[in-house]
Amino acid sequence: MRFYIDESGHTGDSINSGTDLDFAGQPYFVLAGVGIADQDQLEQEVLALRKRHEIADGELKSSEHLHHEAFVSDLIDWLCKSKAPILVEVVDKRFYLCTHMVIATLVRQDYEDMGSHGEYLLSNQVADALSNLASNEALEGFIEACISPSDHSLMTFFGRLLKPLVSKADARLSSTERFIKEVVIDAGIRYKVARDVNPQAHLDFLPSTDLAKRRQPVWMLPNQTSLANLYARINVVLAGKLADVTLVHDEQQQYARVLMDSLSKAERVGELKRLPFTPNADYRFVERAQLKFSSSKLSIGVQVADLIAGLIMRFYRDRKAGRRSSDAHRQAFEKIFDLTTPTTPLGINQVLPTKECVLPTFTGPATQRAR
C-alpha cells in the first residue's frame, strides 16, 4: 500500500507568523494522507471522473480544481466507498504556537507525577487557555526568545505573559486567568532554580531547532509534527504492518531533511520508558515504512491528497472568517469528517482550541474530539 501525502496552508515554521500573527492570511495548516492499495484502479477512476465532469488533462491542483465541485465530491465519495483510509491533520497555527509554549516552557515534563494522561490533559488545558488569553505581544516575545535565546529574552516573555494577569486583583481574575497565572509563576520559579545551577538553563526552557536544506534553523514546523502523527495513525490503521508500505509525500525542496528526521524521531518515541499519551496514534513501531518524495505532476495519488488538503483547509478558513462553504464542499467535508470517531485513527485530527473544533452533527453518546 502507498499513502499519498500533501499539504495546504503552508507558510513555513511558526517563526514566520506574519503581521499581527495572521500567518500571511493562512491561519491553518492541513496535511492529508490517503492510502491506496491498487494504484491502477485509482488512475482509472480519476480518468473516468475527469471524462464524466469534462476536466481537461493536466495536473489536478486544489488551487485550480476545487471549483469543480461535483468532480471533487464524486472523487471523495469513491474513496470512502472503496474504504481507502483518509487521514487528515488540521492545525491552528496560533494554537500550535501555544502548544510549544506549554511543552517547551510552561509544563514541559515537570508534572510527571500526574501520569501521561494527566499531563496530556493539563497541557491541552493550558494551551487552550493561552490561545484565548495570550496577547500578540506575549506570543511575539516567545518567538523572539526562540530566535535569540537568552536569560533576558526568556524573562521578557514571562513578563509579557504575566503583565495583564498581575495588573488586576486576584478577585477580578476569571478562574481561567488564575489558572494560567499560577502555571506561569510556577514555570518561572522552576526556571530560576534551574538557572542558579546552570547559567544556560534558558536553552532547556525553549523549543529546540531543526536544520533545513541549507542548514538554516527551523522552529516549530507544523509539517513536521503533523507528518509524525499521521505516521503513527497509519501504524494503527495497518496494525503495525508497515514493512511494505511507502509514504509518498509531495516534493519538498526545503524541508525534506526535516521531515525525514521527524519520522526517525517518531520511531524512537516507542523506545522511551514512559510513553506520551497519544489518542488514536501508536508510536510503538515494530516495522518501518519508507518515505519518498515525488513531484505532484508525476503522481495522481499526491494530486488527490492535494485536493483533500485544500478542501479541508478552505473549509476551516471560511468557517473562521464567518463564510459558509458551498453545499457541495460542505458535503465533501462531512464525508471525510464522518470517518472520525473517538476510537479510530481515520478522518480528521483537530489540533485546535476547543471552541474551534468541529463537532459531530449526529445525536448520540457524547464524544471527545481528537486533539
Image (spheres, rainbow, N blue to C red):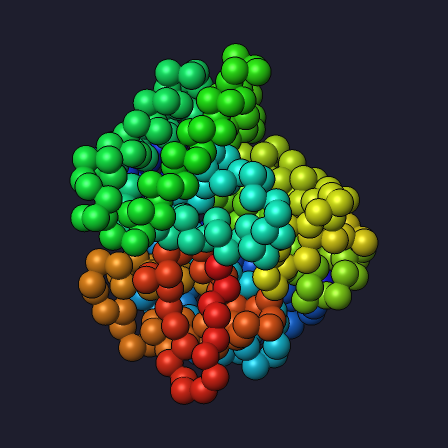
Above or below, 24 against 340 in this view is above
Task: Give the x, y percent position of residue 328.
Answer: 33, 76
Which residue sits at x=74%, y=43%?
272
Task: Give the x, y percent position of residue 59.
Answer: 47, 55
Direction from residue 156 to residue 296 in the image, left or right: right
Q: Nearer the viewer, residue 17 or 60?
A: 17
Q: Residue furthest top?
A: 199
Where, quadrant-wise, is the N terminus in this rendering?
A: bottom right
Task: Give the x, y percent position of residue 191.
Answer: 48, 26
Which residue sits at x=34%, y=74%?
330
Above or below, 23 against 351 in this view is above
Above or below, 69 against 265 in this view is below
Task: Give the x, y percent position of residue 327.
Answer: 29, 77
Residue 290 visible in the displayed image: no
Q: Nearer the viewer, residue 235 or 72?
A: 235
Which residue sits at x=27%, y=72%?
326
Residue 329 picture quarter: bottom left
Above or below, 161 against 68 in this view is above
Count the marks: 0
Direction from residue 342 to residue 137 in the image, left or right: left
Q: Nearer the viewer, residue 137 or 295?
A: 137
Residue 325 visible in the displayed image: yes
Residue 14 picture quarter: top left
Which residue sits at x=34%, y=27%?
157
Q: Residue furthest bottom?
A: 363
